[in-house]
Amino acid sequence: MKILLLVVRKTDEDYIFDGVDKYRNRLKHYIGFEYEEIHDLKNRKTLSKDQQKKLEADLIFSRLKMGDKVVLLDEKGSSFGSVEFSKYLQKKMNSGIRRLVFIVGGPYGFDTSIYNKYQDKLSLSKMTFSHQMVRLFFCEQLYRAMTILKNEPYHHE
């Protein structure tokens, strides 16, 4: 199984890019992991929030493949502790999924067309984080889950 983290908009913060890159390099020892950014919309400032979400949804749909299992990273999703998340991933790996895609929406969230097509949602916290911070937190949690599955000493109970 491969995992793709698909994020809307590039990060403009070097520390986030550096952190994501750190975990991307660590993850390649455990699983096929891809990180993909959907570039910013042209004339974004002239568009309403709904128009932005619709255009972002079109770009998200264009990056997905038949057979992808899609999970939206969304504050209204199911939440897990780190050990539970590792078990969740293990079930997905055992199920024969070829590509598991986690998606981080833009600053206004997802368009209804995305919510209607993909009901699987995962929350990283009850708190709300910026769409830029979520990418770093998710990469760290994915790495943590992989070390838990391999019984490596990164995670402490």
Image (cartoon, helix red, strand yellow):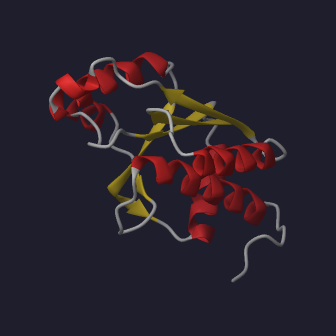
Asked which quadrant contains residue 87, the reply is: bottom right
Q: Residue at horizontal 39%, vertical 60%?
A: 78
The location of residue 121, given as percent across then percent down, is 38, 50
The location of residue 91, given as percent across then percent down, is 61, 52
The location of residue 136, given as percent across then percent down, is 57, 52
What quarter of the picture does the N terminus occupy? top right
Indicate left or right for 97 with 57 as reference: right
| Residue 103 vs residue 84, the one in the foreground | 103
What quarter of the picture does the C terminus occupy? bottom right
Q: Residue at horizontal 57%, vertical 30%?
A: 36
| Residue 73 vs residue 131, the one in the foreground | 131
When the figure is inspected, residue 53 is found, relative to residue 82, above or below; the finding is: above
Indicate left or right for 108 with 101 as reference: left
Asked whether residue 1 is in view, the answer is no
Indicate left or right for 95 with 73 as reference: right
Asked whether residue 72 is in view, the answer is yes
| Residue 93 vs residue 18, the one in the foreground | 18
| Residue 8 vs residue 58, the one in the foreground | 8
When the figure is inspected, residue 145 is found, relative to residue 121, above or below; the finding is: below
Q: Residue at horizontal 51%, vertical 39%?
A: 11
Asked which quadrant contains residue 35, the reply is: top right
The location of residue 75, given as percent across then percent down, is 33, 57
